[in-house]
């Protein structure tokens, strides 16, 4: 349990998490007021660099002005590239627009791309940074809880194609991440809860005490109190550990981050990646399913699966197929959508299963038939 | 001087150069018959991988069939993606086509993209490999002398944009390079000579004995005799040394490879990157100019500059502005084109200059006025 006493200033309330990658270590700063301090934090680390802000037309309205002023005051000569909000922006066409904008602004390799927005912006801007002049530096300023605890850390960038999500991209680590908890003030409760699913994921993967802490404190986290900073910092620390162990997704350690994502992505894909089921909601159902699947295979106690679902439901998240509005695609469609996923390895399915809360592991050879049998029982919940 | 006795088989005639990059070392095989042996060489190194050939519609006609048969026989389940020949293929649009083809062929991260062609194909296919599923492995099978001695080694990939060449791309090392000297049989004498300019470059950078060897043996190299394999292997070895010293172009060592390229790129750009002046010809003029510029600044002996130009001319390469057919752009246009180049650093120009043959170095702060004065004298040659 962390004791939280009131800090006297924003800087004092800031937590720093270091991602200690050899030759490219970077800081994640977490706390209030970081957008206002962004110019100073960036200029202190990258003297002489100029900055191009990439953001979307929603975020541009309420946060880009403050960021621009902060960068301007610090001498970073900011210019801004605004793209449409939404998942469709993760496309080759918009990528080309952003890259062209960076070149038109005559940015060089040592200059900075500053991604201001949610996961879509971070993935797109990071990808653009990684391929412009064969690699510019970039700074993540994630403005959603989902992006703060997941996509802004670890260096995965990418876009979608008509054949699937995130099929094109790079590994390109940011040089700095500024997770301004004030930016979450304008996030809708639904999107805050969706991001919370990824927070809970870190407890479920390998940190049972953190999951227990969330069971006691999720009310304060979702009320955006000081506990939120602790939840974000703990999540970033967990993500950093995994990323350092498996920067390029080769050792298998990073696969644990996909807990809930094989089921979750299939559900998202089957509902068209829209408002019916947003990413964190798909992950919440997927995590509940991963634990129920593990229990049905005799891997973990049924009580653990029930505890996972109970906590996610208490946080206002969906946990069953029946929680998805409208009809859910049939089993074969869902399995095919799992098969299209990058986690397939020559026909066998990879799932992240669990031996208990905080004991997730990678199961590489789940037969499609076991999934079919499990899905049949899911229809009855 | 290397003594070359007749080998009894293609395998015996093969030279192997290792690029000893930590964690991603790879072999460059140089010699005859390598396309026919490609399947065996690849399968031995990457068991279980499948291969997608990327080639252009010129090369497809005479080499892709043999490569496909070799990969097929080795169980690599080859499929082929054919793109139009020519520099225009290095575009976002064609990149998207290649990436989409790889995904449609359901290639995974451990599968191989096999680039069969000249520098355009290697740059494009390598870029596609680096961003498909966040990085597939790839094999370079360069079919031009230029690609064999330069672009296929070192991991630079990329495309052009309307704002400039190679402004978008990645560093992505190949997993294997097969430089089949038989593939050069169909290369036009002009393109062979153009590639030879990059061979000579390695002597000029830091290997005066190799330059002297070329002065004696260029006839046999250009006649595609056994000396050609030695010239390619020596060039690849030189390139490998530089790449290992400076994989991501951060230490400055790699900049030496740009000898002749600041002038050369400007000339190429001013002539529209077309048949009037192909890349190696631009480099030949650029190298002769770099030495004359060095001599005019009192950095190297005028006799060295004369020796460089004499050798390049003996190899049938252009060395003066007057050797370019038609009108040459004016000085300000050329300087602006140099300024657009990635080698610009805040207004000062970077040139690779030389204190003598085999003694090139990076000069970071050449004032534009010194270039103007030098270009005026170049008009009189």
Image (cartoon, coloured by chain):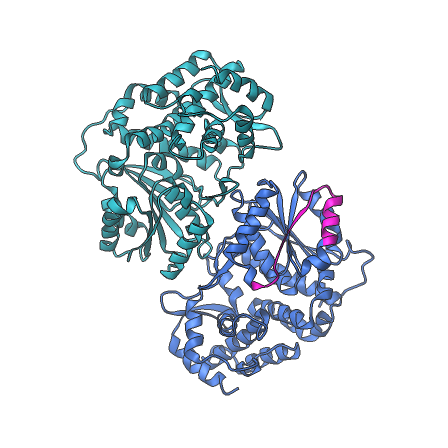
Chain colours: A cyan, B blue
User: Going 69% across and 57% down the picture, which residue do you hit?
Assistant: B60
Residue A75 coordinates in the image, percent (x, y): 26, 57
Image: A8 above or below A85: above
Asked if residue B214 lies left or right of residue A378, the reply is right
Residue A267 in sight: yes
Residue found farthest to the bottom? B380
Q: Quadrant of residue B135?
A: top right
Image: A117 above or below B312: above
User: Going 53% across and 51% down the picture, which residue do you hit?
Assistant: B96
Residue A180 coordinates in the image, percent (x, y): 27, 39
Magenta span includes B76: yes
Bounds of the magenta segment = B65-87
Residue found farthest to the front? A326
Q: Quadrant of residue B370?
A: bottom left
Of B152 and A53, which appears nearest the observer? A53
Magenta span includes B223: no
Of A222 and B157, which appears nearest the observer? A222
Of A68 and B206, which appears nearest the observer? A68
User: Going 46% across and 21% down the picture, which residue do you hit?
Assistant: A289
Residue B309 coordinates in the image, percent (x, y): 59, 79
């Amino acid at each position: 349990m962390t004791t939280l006493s009131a800090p006297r200033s924003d800087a004092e309330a800031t937590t720093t998490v270091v991602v200690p990658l050899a030759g490219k270590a970077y800081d994640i700063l977490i706390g209030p007021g970081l957008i206002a301090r962004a110019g100073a934090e960036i200029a202190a680390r990258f003297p002489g660099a100029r900055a191009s802000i990439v953001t979307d037309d929603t975020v541009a309205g309420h946060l880009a002005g403050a960021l621009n002023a902060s960068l301007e005051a610090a001498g970073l000569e900011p210019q801004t590239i605004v793209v449409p909000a939404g998942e469709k922006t993760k496309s080759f066409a918009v990528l080309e627009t952003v890259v062209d904008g960076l070149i038109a602004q005559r940015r060089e390799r040592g200059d900075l791309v500053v991604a201001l927005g949610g996961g879509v912006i971070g993935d797109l801007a990071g990808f653009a940074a990684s391929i412009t002049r064969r690699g510019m530096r970039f700074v993540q300023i994630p403005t959603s809880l989902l992006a703060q605890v997941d996509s802004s850390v670890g260096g995965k960038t990418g876009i979608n194609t008509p054949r699937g999500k995130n099929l094109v991209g790079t590994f390109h680590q940011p040089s700095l991440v500024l997770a301004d908890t004030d930016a979450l003030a304008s996030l809708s409760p639904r999107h805050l809860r969706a991001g919370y699913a990824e927070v809970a994921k870190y407890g479920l993967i390998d940190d049972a005490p953190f999951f227990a802490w969330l069971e006691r404190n999720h009310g304060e986290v979702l009320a955006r109190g000081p506990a939120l900073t602790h939840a974000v910092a703990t999540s970033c620390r967990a993500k950093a550990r995994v990323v350092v162990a498996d920067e390029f997704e080769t050792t298998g350690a990073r696969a644990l981050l996909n807990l809930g994502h094989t089921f979750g992505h299939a559900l998202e894909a089957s509902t068209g990646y829209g408002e019916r089921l947003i990413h964190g909601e798909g992950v919440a159902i997927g995590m509940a399913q991963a634990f129920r699947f593990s229990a049905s295979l005799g891997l973990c106690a049924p009580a653990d699966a029930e505890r996972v679902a109970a906590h996610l439901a208490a946080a206002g998240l969906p946990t069953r197929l029946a929680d998805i509005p409208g009809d859910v695609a049939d089993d074969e469609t869902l399995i095919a959508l799992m098969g299209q996923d990058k986690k397939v390895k020559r026909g066998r399915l990879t799932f992240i299963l669990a031996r208990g809360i905080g004991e997730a592991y990678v199961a590489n050879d789940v037969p499609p038939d076991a999934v079919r049998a499990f899905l049949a029982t899911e229809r009855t919940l």
